[in-house]
Image (cartoon, rainbow, N blue to C red):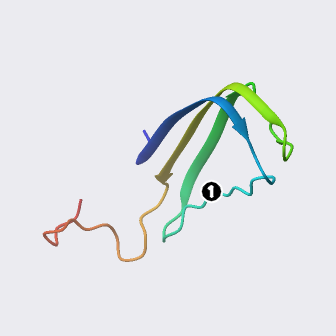
Amino acid sequence: MWDISFRSTVRADQLRFTEEPRTAVRFPGSGDRESTSHSDRTNLPARVLPGQEYHDVTVVYRLATRLTSEPEGGRSGTDGTDG
C-alpha cells in the first residue's frame, strides 16, 4: 500500500520541443521512504530531439511513495493525536 500514488495521462496531436527537457522527481521530507516513478510513452522516444515534431503522442506517468519508517517526532494528526 502506498501513502501517495499519482497517475496522469497527457495526449497531444502534435508536439515539438525547442530544447531537450530536464526532468527530476524528488520526495523531500523526513523519514525513510520507498518510491517509484515510471512513464509509458507512445510515439515519443525516451530522449526527444529539439525541433523534431512528434505526432499522436501519449504519455502515462505514475509515481508512488510510502514511508518505511516514522519521521523524527512521529506522525501526528491536526488535532495533536497520532495517526
- Residue 18 or residue 46, whichever sits in front: 18
Pointer 1 residue: 25
Q: Amino acid at mark 1?
A: Val
x then y, percent, for residue 69: 47, 61
- Residue 42 or residue 83, whichever sits in front: 42
Where is the N terminus found, in terms of image quarters? top left
* Residue that appears at 55% across and 61% down: 27
Where is the C terminus found, in terms of image quarters? bottom left
* Residue that appears at 84% across and 38% down: 52
Q: Height in image: 77 above or below 4?
A: below
Q: Quadrant of residue 81?
A: bottom left
Q: Is residue 66 visible?
A: yes
Q: How many marks?
A: 1
Q: Is residue 44 visible?
A: no
* Residue that appears at 25% across and 68% down: 76
* Residue that appears at 70% across and 55% down: 23
- Within 10 Å of disc 1 (Cα), the crowding (few <14, some 14-19, many 20+) is few
